[in-house]
Image (cartoon, rainbow, N blue to C red):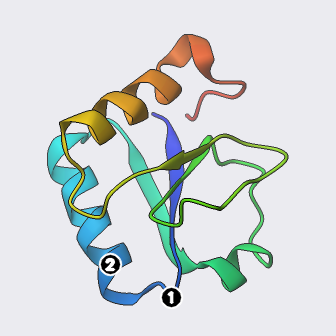
Amino acid sequence: MPRVIVVCPAGGITAAMLIFRLRSELPEIESVEAMSIKDLNRHNIANIDAIITTAHSLVHKDIPVISVHPLLGADDLAKVRAVLNPPNLTRLGP
């Protein structure tokens, strides 16, 4: 099961809304944690397959970053599926 961190500029309501949508639309993805951008720097990403974020300027050198709208529309779902398709992962979650 792919593991992701949900990152929003301030965390909070937007991150919670995005996690709710992820869980309902993509139950095969494990949302490990929601956090703000500043908290991401303090998080261990060793077992994370991707970052899903509403912050379109966020980049990370070690794992894929998927920028989406908080309401997670059809185009966003397609982006997430494309990146988290197992052949695209460098590490498959347990």
Q: Nearer the viewer, residue 28 or 61?
A: 61
**Three-letter amino acid code at disc 2?**
Thr
Circles 2, 1 touching at the beta carbon (< 8 Å): yes
Is the residue 2 above or below the residue 16 in the image? above
Q: Check the picture and name the quadrant holding the C terminus.
A: top right
Q: Residue at x 54, y 59 (%)?
A: 56
Q: Nearer the viewer, residue 62 or 76?
A: 76
Q: Residue at x 51, y 27 (%)?
A: 83
Q: What kind of element bears circle 1? A: loop
The spot of residue 46 in percent (x, y) is 78, 51
Is the residue 77 above or below the residue 12 in the image? above
The spot of residue 32 in percent (x, y) is 49, 61
Dot 1: few (<14), some (14–19), or many (≥20) neighbours within 10 Å? some
The spot of residue 58 in percent (x, y) is 66, 61
> Going by the picture, which residue comes out furthest to the front?
57
Dot 2: few (<14), some (14–19), or many (≥20) neighbours within 10 Å? many
Q: Label 1 belongs to which residue?
A: 10
Judge left or right: residue 66 versus residue 74. Answer: right
- Distance from disc 2 to disc 1, alpha carbons, whole Å, reads 8 Å
Identify the image quadrant of residue 88: top right
Q: Check the picture and name the quadrant holding the N terminus.
A: top left
**Three-letter amino acid code at disc 1?**
Ala
Disc assigned to residue 14: 2
Is the residue 47 above or below the residue 6 in the image? above
Q: Residue at x 24, y 42 (%)?
A: 27
Q: Residue at x 44, y 64 (%)?
A: 54
The spot of residue 90 in percent (x, y) is 72, 24
Disc assigned to residue 74: none
Q: What kind of element bears circle 2? A: helix
Give the total number of marks visible in the rendering: 2
Identify the image quadrant of residue 62: top right
